[in-house]
Amino acid sequence: MRLGLALFMDENVNARVKEVQSWGFDNIQLCFWEPKYWTDEWLQVLKDTIEETKIEITHCWAGFDPPVAWNFIDGPISVGFVPEAYREHRTKQVLQGARFAKQLGVKYVATHLGFIPEDPNDPLYKGVLVAVNLMAKTLEKDGQVLLFETGQETPTVLIRLFEDLEKRGTTNVGVNFDPANFLHYGKANPIDAVHLLGKYIKGVHAKDACYPTCGYYLGLEKPIGEGMVDFPRFFEALREVGYDGFITIEREIECDPPMMENPVAKMIIDARDYLLPLIK
């Protein structure tokens, strides 16, 4: 396994990648929450940065326009591709992000699907299935794989989605596995989820969190090693299902300027030092 860092795209991306390199990382997952960066100008900036630093971009995370609410009340009606009002526009945006990733030479494109209904008879589920199938089929033509970051849905719902896609001949899909998100949303024990989703895991976030303590807000994110993710057992489970890919440290507030005097930067360094012995 190789350890890397999730980096949120912004105007200072060249300096930020160099900072990541100075911390000893040789790969990043590049997160685009703002589609405004999918331009020829920023493509050249990123190509130049990659050439200069030799940092590998393992995954591109393709975001979409607001509204997006990270809670249990407004989340189901705003996040991802479940809300019908935003589905078509966001599908086009993710496909735009995938084309940008292709130009960067990145195979894996990840996004959040949203609060997928557990009832497969729900019209919203069927609408998501159609949109995902369209995106995946389009990416397949460019040799890319569409990944769904875990979180708002149970592992069983994801397995059903994959099985329904396979019935349509779509297999270039998988998960960007985030153990903390399963806890954030109260959807599963991450260790159990690894064994359920094993063959679909194409990327892994290293992040820590706790279960929710009320019915309105997500569980709290914690510094790695201080939450409820049992990382030694987590990596053992990943090995048991045959995963030997990238482990990407993610801090949701990592988008702050990554300077050493910043406490978030210290958390990243501490996470690196905690995780490296576990993944070797």
Image (spheres, rainbow, N blue to C red):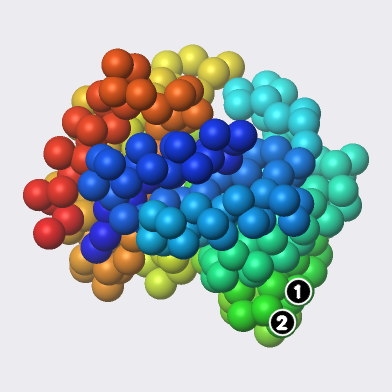
Task: Say if mark 2 contacts mark 1, CB within 8 Å.
Answer: yes
The image quarter in which residue 120 lies: bottom right
> Which residue has dot 2 on it?
141
Q: Is residue 201 left or right of residue 92?
A: left
Mark 1 lies on a secondary structure that is: helix
Q: Which mark is residue 250?
A: none
Tell me where residue 277 appears, x and y as whole percent: 9, 49
Question: Looking at the rendering, in which quadrant would you find the C terminus?
Answer: bottom left
* Residue 153 can be seen, yes or no: no
Q: Is residue 225 left or right of residue 210?
A: left
Kindly report the distance in space between the C-alpha atoms of the residues bearing marks 2 and 1: 6 Å
Residue at image x 59%, y 65%?
104
Tell me where residue 218 appears, x and y as whole percent: 50, 23
- Given residues 46 and 66, the one toward you in this image is 46
Residue at image x 68%, y 79%?
142
Q: Residues within 10 Å of mark 1 (few under 14, many from 20)?
A: some
Mark 2 lies on a secondary structure that is: loop
Q: Amino acid at mark 1?
A: Thr
Above or below residue 134? Residue 33 is above
Q: Amino acid at mark 2?
A: Lys
Above or below residue 195? Residue 153 is above
> Which residue has dot 1 on it?
138
Q: Residues within 10 Å of mark 2 (few under 14, many from 20)?
A: few
Question: Looking at the rendering, in which quadrant would you find the N terminus?
Answer: bottom left
Tell me where residue 162 appears, x and y as whole percent: 59, 69
* Residue 134 can be seen, yes or no: yes
- Given residues 176 and 97, the one toward you in this image is 97
Tell me where residue 235 appears, x and y as whole percent: 21, 55
Q: Is residue 49 left or right of residue 248?
A: right
Labels in figure, total: 2
